[in-house]
Amino acid sequence: MQQSHQSIPDQQQGQQQQQLQGEERQLQRTRGVLSEALRQACAVQQCMQQGSYQPKHEQAFSVVLTAQEKEQMLEGYRDSERALLAQVQRLLHSAEAAPEAEVSAQELREDAVLAHVVQGAPQKEEGSSLHLTLDACSLLLDHHPDVSVRQQVYELGLEGRCLRALQLMDQLADVRLKIARCCGYPSYSHLLRSGPTTGSCCTPAASTLLTQLVEALGPAAQQQVQQHGHAAVAAAADDDASGGG
């Protein structure tokens, strides 16, 4: 009875075949992983270009996008930045964009402060239109003695404008963060500190809005506090007098 066995060359050939099969399986797995990674990268790239995805790491744009794609995104963001800054500029400094209030002819005759502020505006028989610019609001809040008029000026001329300005500034901050991330910086302040920003049009209008409002509202608010204080003292004196009687 003879024992069957493989020759050494046959064993080596079998081992080589098994090794090749293993390498082929590993190659197929690698191809699958690379294919999935490429698919995900393309999806992320598309979302980044559309602006629907903002990666947290500041270098992500440089890794995923080509230089041309990144420049196209930057140009779009800078266009948005310029448009928002123009809206802020118009909101703060354009008389045409300011809220409008109608002042009757009788009010103009009896109210010297209103008449002074309305000077230069087109006059009509029934009165005049007052554009509540920041300058007009400041004058009325500083000098008008009637608290109800000052309240109307605040509500008509400043309240809505403040809300809109804050909304625009939030949008501007978001766009500038995208600009910074696209340039490889974690924030817009880091980008500014790195050197000049080509294509960025900066204006002090947005940054000085709250300062202007504080300067306009401060004296009127202080006057109201004093009036309330005097009224409280008078009321307390009346109560004491009533109690003593």
Image: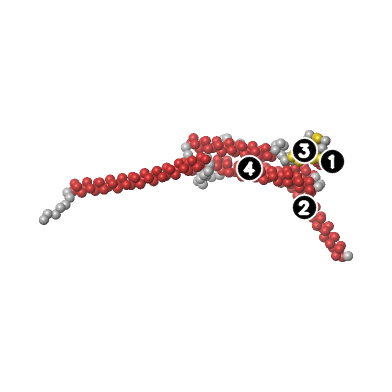
Q: Is residue 2 left or right of residue 133?
A: left
Q: Which residue is mark 2?
A: 225
Residue denoted by label 3: 129
Q: Quadrant of residue 229?
A: bottom right
Distance Cα–Cα, label 1 vs label 3 = 13 Å
Q: Secondary structure at mark 4?
A: helix
Question: Where in the figure is residue 230, as x and y percent of width and height?
Answer: 81, 55
Would you call the spot at circle 2 few (<14 residues within 10 Å), some (14-19), or many (20 or more)? few
**Mark 2 or 1, nearer chain start:** 1
- Percent coordinates x, y for residue 125 in the rendering: 83, 35
Q: Are marks 2 and 1 in contact (CB under 8 Å)?
A: no
Name the residue rendered at 67%, 37% in the picture.
90
Which comes sooner in the sequence, label 3 or label 2? 3
Q: CA distance from mark 3 to mark 4?
A: 27 Å
Mark-to-mark CA distance, 4 and 1: 39 Å
Residue found at x 44% / y 44%: 40
Of tags 4 and 1, which is closer to the observer?
Answer: 1
Of residues 242 and 210, the one drawn nearer to the viewer in this rendering: 242
* Label 1 residue SS: helix
**Looking at the image, which residue sits at the far right?**
245
Label 1: few (<14), some or many (≥20) within 10 Å? few
The circle drawn on residue 106 is 1
Please report whichever mark, 2 or 4, sits nearer to the chain's N-terminal start: 4
Q: Residues within 10 Å of mark 4 (few under 14, many from 20)?
A: some
Name, please, the residue furthest toward the front: 126
**Three-letter code, disc 1:** Gln
Mark 2 vs mark 1: in front:
1
The residue to which callout 4 is attached is 168
Which callout, 1 or 3, points at the residue further toward the start of the chain?
A: 1
